[in-house]
Amino acid sequence: MTESQRPSGEYPMYPSYGNGDAAYPPPPAHQPAQPISTGPGTTVWPGSGGAGHSGGDGYGGFGQGLPQPAPQPSGHGRRAKRPVALLAAVAVAAAVVGGVTATAVGQFTGTGSSGTDSSSVISGTTVSQTSAGTVAGVAKAVSPTIVEIGATSTAGESTGSGVIITSDGEIVTNNHVIAGASSIKVTLSTGRTYTAKVVGTDADKDLALIDLEGASGLKTATLGDSSGIKVGDQVVAIGSPEGLTGTVTSGIVSALNRDVTVAKDSEGGQGQGQQGGGSDWPFEFGGQQFNGDTGNSTTTYKAIQTDASLNPGNSGGALISMNGEIIGINSAMYSASSSGGSSSSGAGSVGLGFAIPVNTLKADLDTLRAGNSS
């Protein structure tokens, strides 16, 4: 036997068991695990958690009772598996990117939260609630551009409405609102009043242009395109019925291209809210006269029919689309209680109103501004 050349005490000694000479470590606390027979070339060791061992001491393995993976082949076989590992890495990266994207969408939409599975995040578009397209929104935007017109003539006083189209005080209205007036007073939505003068009139189209004296910085209405409106479109009407400044009503476009006939001058009693009784807002339709006698001098135009409530005093006011553009100038309405020429008391809208298309007004503006009267 060869003697050991190591110095004394270089390796620890263990207590003796049985008849041995204290040269072996103590036995394990339990019976060493035995290999499990599997297919050729594979040995499975049960164990409790050591990693990277392939057998020998009973402590290797990858978890309680789980088989240990077979040794990886060397050389060509190992290189052949690199694409698989690369694909796995790409898949992991894609999953990370997907998670970040879903989280960003969740933060944008307000549906995401920390610790939430990205698969539960619902993408969408945040929509801010606005007043656009509502009656309230249209009224708020357009009401400052609608005025009340008070006209005094030999026949008495009448009330109508008008629409501001320039910041220095040009206002369009119906000819029959200011026909024969000796003085005109205009009240803005703020309550401020101005004196106005007539610039031009077109009795054939029942349109007139007046101008405020000393006005500036006024809010103006936007003139739209009446050729694009359709039956059933929602509309808003703003005016001063019976002197109630800034009254807002709404309805739809009931029909298009209605032939409406109105008086060209004051002899038919067309003044709105005329004092001392008399007929209000007379017009003809289908060969019949409504709201009184239109007189001998009349004109006929194509009108938009609406069921938005119109009453005496709405004449010259605005019929407005839901995007806030003027599509017509309110000009006539049917009132059942005064259809036989009776007093205006008790007259009211029954959903048959008419407006001059705004395209008719736009085509006539240059003529009105030139001071022509007809």
Image (cartoon, rainbow, N blue to C red):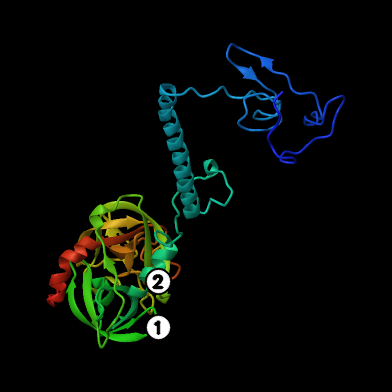
Q: Which mark is residue 255?
A: none
Is residue 337 visible in this depiction of the protein? Answer: no
> x, y percentage for residue 142?
36, 69
Residue 260 against residue 88 in the figure, above or below? below
Camera-side residue of 164 and 110: 110
349 sits left or right of 39 in the view: left
**Residue depicted at 37% across the width and 79% down the height:** 275
Three-letter residue code for mark 2: Pro
Check disc 1 and report the residue beneath it: 191
The 10 Å Cα crowd at callout 2, few under 14, some 14 to 19, many 20 or more, is: many
Camera-side residue of 120 and 89: 89
Residue occupying the far right of the picture: 18
Three-letter residue code for mark 1: Gly
98 sits left or right of 234 in the view: right
> x, y percentage for residue 284?
27, 59
Q: CA distance from mark 1 to mark 2?
A: 16 Å
Is residue 366 visible in this depiction of the protein? Answer: yes
> x, y percentage for residue 221?
29, 70
44 sits left or right of 311 in the view: right
| Residues at circles 1 and 2 in contact by the CB criterion of under 8 Å | no
113 sits left or right of 13 in the view: left
Task: State which quadrant residue 164 falls in.
Answer: bottom left
Q: Tell me the quarter of the image containing the C terminus.
A: bottom left
Check disc 2 and report the residue beneath it: 241
Task: State which quadrant residue 259 falls in.
Answer: bottom left
Task: State which quadrant residue 11 falls in.
Answer: top right
Residue occupying the far bottom of the picture: 214
Mark 1 or mark 2, earlier in chain: 1
**Residue depicted at 65% across the width and 20% down the height:** 44
